[in-house]
Amino acid sequence: TGANVGMLTCNVAGGVGFVFGSSKDLSCLFTRTDGVAERYKGTIKKFGIDIGFTKEAQVVWLVFAPGSIAPGSLAGAYGGGTASATVGVGAGAHVLVGANKQITLQPVAVEGSVGLNVAAGIGEVELNYVK
């Protein structure tokens, strides 16, 4: 819910998934609708079935909030359902809601990854503001 306040583009590090989940590093750029940008670092985690390996990927989310947000406001935890599959070049989708329920990340471009991987379960993203 709310208005589109910008776009969050994240590069996801490659890695190996395990039966109960995986954790991969994120490097993100949040670009506000007025063109001002801010950087975030963090992790993306999958809890559930996650088996295989992937190289680097990219995920792009539209960011929705009830109004304008202050610098660093995307910092925090987000969670939601997740599913993806990769054989060669793959795709996935991650719709995430912030812990405060005020900010929502909705995918506009699914991750493009190279590898062999199957994952399903609960996804979590933790973002830290980089000044």
Image (spheres, rainbow, N blue to C red):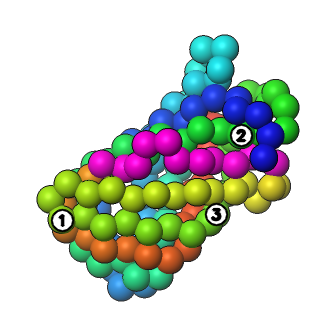
* Residue 2 horizontal side relative to residue 80, left or right: right
Query: What SS does tag 3 mark?
Result: strand
Q: CA distance from mark 2 to mark 3?
A: 15 Å
* N-term-proximal mark, 1 vs 2: 2
Q: Which mark is residue 64?
A: 2
- Magenta-tinted stretch: 102-112
Instruction: Name the amino acid type tagged 2.
Output: Phe
* Residue 2 horizontal side relative to residue 21, left or right: right
* N-term-proximal mark, 2 vs 3: 2
**Magenta segment includes 104:** yes
Mark 3 lies on residue: 79
Q: Residue at x 26, y 70 (%)?
A: 117
Residue 60, horizontal then vertical, whole percent: 47, 40
Q: CA distance from mark 1 to mark 3?
A: 25 Å
Residue 9, horizontal then vertical, whole percent: 48, 36
Instruction: Name the amino acid type tagged 1.
Output: Val
Q: Is residue 91 above or below residue 68?
A: below
Mark 1 lies on residue: 87
Residue 30 position by quadrant? top right
* Residue 53 horizontal side relative to residue 73, left or right: left
Q: Residue at x 37, y 44 (%)?
A: 58
**Magenta segment includes 24:** no
Query: What SS does tag 1 mark?
Result: strand
Q: Is residue 112 above or below residue 53?
A: above
Q: How many other residues sit within 10 Å of disc 3, few (<14), some (14-19) or many (≥20)?
A: many
